[in-house]
Structures are given as C-alpha cells and as structure tokens.
Image (spheres, grey):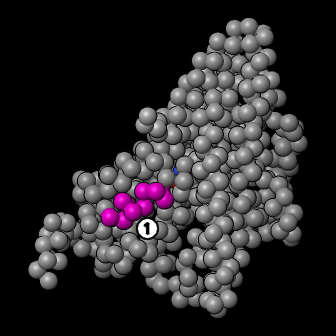
Amino acid sequence: MKKIALHWQILIGMFAGVVVGLLLSKSDIGSQIVIDYIKPFGKIFINLLKLIAIPLIIASLIKGISDLKDLSKLSSMGLKTIGLYLSTTVIAIVIGLTVVNIINPGSKISAENRESLMEDFSDNAATKIEAALNTSERGPLDALVNVVPSNIFEAASGNGNMLQVIFFVIFFAIGLILIPSEKAAPVKAFFDGLNDIILKMIDLIMLGAPYGVFALLAALVVESPGSDVFISLLWYALCVLIGLGLMIFVVYPTAVKLFTGKSYKFFFKGISPAQLLAFSTSSSAATLPVTMERTEEHLGVDKEVTSFVLPIGATINMDGTSLYQAVAAVFIAGALLPEPLTWGNQLTIVMTAGLASIGSAAVPGAGMVMLVIVLGAIGVPEAGLALIFAVDRPLDMCRTAVNVTGDAAVAMIVAKFEGKLNDPIPKEWDDHLEKVK
Ligand code: ASP
C-alpha cells in the first residue's frame, strides 16, 4: 500500500483528535480518559520538540556560519547577501507584527477562558508573568546585556536563555572560521555530522507528529473552556496567511521588479515549481536542488551566485518562519497573558524572531521548535505552543514556500548587483549548445 504523506497523516491526526475529543467530552468519564491517558502523549511530543531545541541551534548555526569559510575576506557578494537576507527578515517580522497587532487574535479569548487556559498550560505561569513584568521595568540596555551569558552551561541549562546560547554559538563559529583550516576541519566535520544527527532526530520526532497532534487536539477539545479559543485560532491562522501573502505577492515581486527590472509574471513563472515543492515538503532544504535549478535556468542567475547565495539562504534566510514566529508569539501572549505586550516586548520579538528563524533548520516543524526562544524571551509559558499546534502544519507549508521565494528573490538581486543576471537560456537551447561545442 502506498504510504500516506506526512502532512496528510498529520491532518488526519488533527481531525481524529477533534472528533475523539468531541465524542469523549460528552461524558465525565470520557473527559477523564482523555486527560489521563491521551493528553500525556501530547505532552511527551512537546517535550521532545523542546528537548531538541538547544542541540538544534548549536549544530545548525555552527554549520551554517562555518560554511561561509572565510570571514576576513567575506566578499562583497557575501556582505550583500547577508544584508539583503537580514533586511527581508526584518521586513517580514514587521509585517507580521503589524498584521497581528491590528487583528489581535489573542484578545478574542474571554478573560475567564484565558485564566483557565493559563492554568492548563502553565505550571509556573505566575513566575513567568512576574519575570515579564520585571523585564519591562528594567533599564533600556538590559536586554542587550542579557544576550551575553557569563556561563554557557548555565545558559544552556534552560530553554528560556536560548538567545544567550545563540550568542555563544555565533561567537564560537566566528572563532572556528578564523583559525587555520587544518585545525578547523575536524571540528567542522564533527558539527556537520552532529547537524545530520539532529536533523534525523527531528525526522523521527515528526514521525510521531500525527499521534502527538491527535493527543494535543483531543485534550484541547476536552479541556477547551469555550469555542472562542477555536475562533481565535482561525483568526491567528488568518494573520499568518495575510502576512505571508503580502511577502510572496507584494514584497518579493516588487523588490525584484525594482532592483532587476524583471516582471511579476517572469518571476512567478520561474520560481513556482520550487514554491509548490516547498509547500508540499515543508522543507527548504529538501527543495534546495529545485530552487537552484529554477533560479539558474529560469530566472537567469549565474551559477556562481546561486551556489553561494541559495544554500546559505536555505539555512539562515527564513522570512516566512520569522513572520510566523512573530505572529504566533503575539497571539500566544495575547491568549495567555492578562497584560498587553509592551513596545519593549515587541522589539524583543523582532530580535528573537530574527535570530530564531536564522537558527531554524530547513526541515518541517523547525520554526515551531524555535518559537520556544521567542516565547521564553518575552516571558510567555512555552507550553502555550499547544495552542497553535492544531494549525501549524498547513502554516508550515505556506511559510516554507515564502522562505524559498525569499531566497530566490535575493539571489536575483545579488546577481544583478554583481553583473551576473543573464537572460535565462531555455534548457533545450542549452543542451543544443553543449552538443555543438
Ligand atoms: N519548514 C520550514 C522550512 O524548511 C522551517 C519552519 O518554519 O518550520 O523552511
């Protein structure tokens, strides 16, 4: 029998969870069964995701940065690429924050339901809120000071300090690039291998996703205090989709037109197969070969540019993911915290969502794992992830399509700046030319 694709399995798990939850919530015994025997599996699934977060940042960031090879001679192409990647990421986050602050899906949950959600989702909610309030009372540069850990083991011992871990890892990777290559080689090889192991572990965890999602949804339905939770979830999904839609249909094609003069139609015709593949695999890494092929052969970017810009982009440039993380963080905060987020919190979201998206691996579900960092940084209970689980997979598919499109758009712009944007040569002509040669 043909194996059902994972995204379908997850959708089936979601659906089954809702149905079972609805059926069992009709009786007290049924509800108790869900809480005692089904819910724990959802908790295990979330724990597994949180468990992998710190090793994932360490391995994928070190690999991503050390692939840059030469820091001192970072070519003009490197600087342009990183500059453009950072700019598109910040634009994406700002768009996400704007949409979610206007629509404010978290506030659609009543105060009563918020309290009971908070009790369900958080063991130590009170301390977290207190921490959040304390943060807003501190000095203006304290957030910056907090990024620099005084002890890496202490920083790595809790999921709330991931920004400090990221700081250490980036610092470490820069050191790695700067030492002689024969000394760096074994360390780099070690982290390459480690990265593969972590990605495999995420693969394995994702195999359990249909069951995890089933358990989470069944528990959510049984424990859900009211239908406004579901309605607000739909509003949340809508915020993410509006933001992603703006990126893919407005920001990228406009930037491409502005900087390279290439038309909307040309851009979409060239990149759409990669977008569709990204959508169905939810993995920029899996899509990379197709992204490269389309960008070279159909968008006319020279191989010299694609082979540098696109692999780095697949690892660090995730505009869709960063936008989603910003929206999700504000939504979960709105759903669980009684106080609205401060400007300082929103600024923290811009920084942490940017870093978290850079640290996200290009595989399904990675963006949600890294959301833990953003939540931790603004003092929202990480267990609030359970709230958005139900709709995460379809959103992952859409944000991955945005991630890939962003990489291709930046590759075109860098190629234009470097004088390496050609008119694409249709494959048949290319083959013909090869033969003639
Ligand atoms: N699935 C995304 C990607 O591969 C990452 C994520 O947001 O989960 O680009």
Residue shown at 62% from the left, 48% from the top: 204
Residue 360 screen position, x and y as percent = 60, 57
- Report the residue that reaches farthest toward the top: 27
Identify the amino acid type marked 1.
Leu
Q: Is residue 351 magenta?
A: no
Residue 309 screen position, x and y as percent = 44, 71
Residue shown at 58% from the left, 84% from the top: 71
Could you say whether the residue bearing mark 1 is in a helix, strand or loop?
helix
- Give the side of residue 75 with respect to residue 422, left or right: right
Residue 361 screen position, x and y as percent = 58, 58
Q: Mark 1: give few (<14), some (14-19) or many (20+) Cα within 10 Å.
A: many
- Give the side of residue 188 with respect to residue 162, left or right: left
The magenta-colored residue range is 284-293
Residue 83 screen position, x and y as percent = 50, 71
Q: Quadrant of residue 119?
A: top right
In the picture shown, does residue 48 fall above or below 156?
above
Q: Is the magenta stretch mostly helix, strand or loop?
A: helix
- Give the side of residue 240 with respect to residue 171, left or right: left
Of residues 41 and 420, the one drawn nearer to the viewer in this rendering: 41
Residue holding disc 1? 310
Which quarter of the figure is the N terminus placed in? top left
Q: Quadrant of residue 110?
A: top right
Q: Can residue 403 be seen in this view?
A: yes
Which quarter of the figure is the C terminus placed in? bottom left
Q: In which quarter of the image is residue 213?
A: top right
